[in-house]
Image (cartoon, helix red, strand yellow):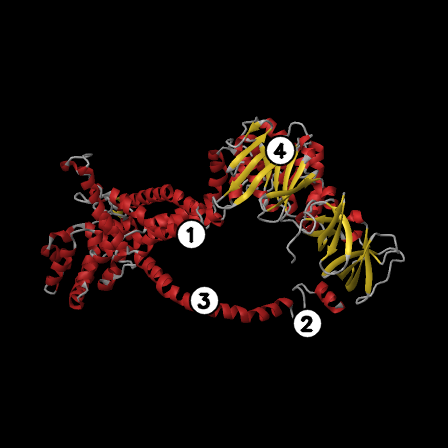
Amino acid sequence: MVDATINNGNKSDGLLTDDGQSLKAKLALATRRNKTKAFLLVAPLLFFIVITFVWPIGVMLYRSVNSPQFTNAFSSTAVVIKDWDGQGLPSEEVFTAFVADMVQARKDRTIGKAGTRINYELPGTRSLFTGTARKAKKLEAPFKESLIAVNEKWANPEIWAAVKRLSSRYTLSFYLASLDLKYDKSGEIVTQPEDRQIYVTLFLRTFWISGLVMLFTILLGYPVAYLLSVLPLRTSNLLMIMVLLPFWTSLLVRTTAWIALLQREGIINDVLVFIGVISDENRIQMIYNQAGTIIAMTHILLPFMVLPLFSVMKTIPPSYMRAARSLGATQFTAYTRVYMPLTLPGIGAGSVLVFILSVGYYITPALVGGRTGTLISNVIAGHMQQSLNWGLAAALGALLLASVLVLYWFYNKIVGVDNMKFG
Amino acid sequence: MSDTQSMGDPFVRFEKVQKSYDGEILVVKDLNLDIAKGEFLTMLGPSGSGKTTCLMMLAGFETATHGQIYLGKDPINDVPPHKRGIGMVFQNYALFPHMTVAENLAFPLEVRNMSKNDIETKVKRALDMVELGIFGNRMPAQLSGGQQQRVAVARALVFEPDLILMDEPLGALDKQLREQMQYEIKHIHERLGVTVVYVTHDQAEALTMSDRIAVFNDGVIQQLSSPSDLYERPQNSFVAQFIGENNKLSGKIKAVSGDVCTIELDGGGGTVEALAINIGAKGEQTTLSLRPERIEINPDKGSVPNTLKGKIEELIYLGDHVRTRMSVSGNSDFIVKVPNTHGHKLLKEGETAIVGWMTEDCRALDSLPST
């Protein structure tokens, strides 16, 4: 004991055990077994998450800045065009390399991909590339003049500016496109012409609709959660099943059920016409627009609001309300000053859940959204499946992810994540 | 209940109050109770005896199925809780967890639209009263159980109500703190002169604090009297059994003459005399109640009128006294407290001894089904 005390005083690396080893090292040794065990227990899930979540997101982020299709096909052009100052047309050296690359690319069948890629930068250039490539083999020096002879568009410096931009494997152009911006021919960032601005509007609409859905789920879910929390257990269990029942029904079924209800020849319009509220010609358009998206999404996401609210409300003892009443507060004051503030963690958790889920909602807006009710995720899917512009899809997705993270950060600043209860 | 009638105008009055939750069982049966101004009245009883229901009816959180409750001279059955002006301390304090201590205390004043200055002075005074002056900015969760308890009391008092209800307020505290808080609440009551209705199932708490105790069982007040009367003069077997330690012996009434009756014990112990308090006619069963500290072991001959033979089963040394378990007249759980005085009698387990008592200390009450 005396030794230990002396050691303790002399050594700076902390307490020592009887046999002179550092206590920290001993402790680490003793807990290592448990730590290993804990790690092995979570290892399968960790592995699964890395494979199915971390890796795809990494790939997506990489794709949003990586664009190798053009440099793969025009590798020697990419090297020599770097010296071009962007004034007038590039030198003959660039044209020579370009034609050689074009011949090779046609042989390797990579000309199509390269043409598609440059088409994103400069719409209408794909056919110029594929068309010229067919004749490239027969071209003779000087290549500048012979190329322009094939198609006078080759005399347009904008095309060469685009080729120079694409000579790097990494690009921000997908992100610019996602924000309705682009490079002009001198390489400056400018806004897209008005008729091509779509994504910013879509982002704003997505956040607006998500916010509305969040608000409606709070308005509709709060009373339900309150009722659930005060009813006797047997009744509240029954009600809870009714809240959860939509959860267990296929999303598709629920969405199509709304179509049956809301469409022009649907049940609600039929009833309204039948009781004479509206005339047959003036049936209300409730679906295939924003209203349809909001109604269907509110219904589908309601349980995500009710459950966290319920789990918070259940923990609020009735004595708080009674105390407030006995202290002289009316039912209303007791409710707003004591009960509501105590349910804030539930409102917070439900709002974050509903908002984040709606921001990425896809199937429902696709089915009932029509033109005005489409969300950003529908466009992302379109770029994945139809236009096959994965780079743009990835950039849009990354922006969506980033904006959700920013909103979450704000939420944490204002409400505090520690105050949030998911149940 | 002659003392309640001499009270003049009662401050709180329960008149023929009945309460049923399901329409089949009466939780409170025909309750009549008058509480004087400034009185500390405790409702004591086992759980399910109806005492908390009575308190909740008084606070306004339950409505009486039948009968009327008066506060002052006004019937209050239809008055909502927030207009009754009754302070209440809840079992788990019910301090609002999202407000600081000072905000908790300010709450009843704010809802009464008091001015900021008034609120500040009153909150400060209330906090000083419970010696928590420096804790105003803490959250309730940062306080110990005892401190939370004091805040709850201060909050119930801060708007100066004439009546305070307390629903087992000390139930969550440990023994030592509970005893300390009992005195503090008692002193606050004496200092402010408010009327307190206090609910508990802890008889020691009731005996320490109350002016009068109403013992509840089965929805009925079994006895309403001062703590000393309750202990020394129980009116029925339930009260005798519920308050303090009690020895019971069952027997048959042989004769009654004035205050005193003669009982033949069932266990074959013989015949003894007891005060006739709550008995039937000759020949009926009765239960005798005897406090353990009023029984003498091996008394001097002729010093006590009633003696029985018993066998010493167990001796438990408790410092100030020796707890002696005996078997007397068929009751093997007959407790005698032998004080640890200088030169007290030395007893051994298994010995036979004589137990004796004065007739005034033995009360013949209603017959209990033998357990």
Q: Kindly identify which numbered label has been placed on residue A42.
A: 3
Do marks 1 and 4 share a chain? no
Do marks 1 and 2 share a chain? yes
Separation (CA) of disc 3 from disc 4: 59 Å
Q: Amino acid at mark 1?
A: Arg
Indicate the position of residue A66 as horizontal and vertical percent values.
30, 59
Do marks 2 and 4 share a chain? no
Chain of the residue where label 1 is placed in the rendered structure = A
Question: Which residue is disc 4 drawn over?
Answer: B163
Front label number (1 vs 3): 1
Separation (CA) of disc 2 from disc 4: 68 Å
Q: Kindly identify which numbered label has been placed on residue A234.
A: 1
Do marks 3 and 4 share a chain? no
Q: Which residue is pictured at 78% across the width and 64% down the height?
A: B311
Query: Marks 2 and 3: CB-CB under 8 Å?
Result: no
Chain of the residue where label 2 is placed in the rendered structure = A
Sequence-earlier tag: 2 or 3? 2
* Direction bottom: furthest residue: A19
Question: Which residue is disc 2 drawn over?
Answer: A20
Query: Marks 2 and 4: CB-CB under 8 Å?
Result: no
Towards the viewer: A67 or A350: A350
Q: Residues within 10 Å of mark 3 (few under 14, many from 20)?
A: few
Q: Amino acid at mark 4?
A: Leu
Front label number (3 vs 4): 4
Residue B183 higher or lower than A63, as above or below: above
Residue A146 higher or lower than A289, as above or below: below
Query: Marks 1 and 3: CB-CB under 8 Å?
Result: no
Callout 2: SS: loop
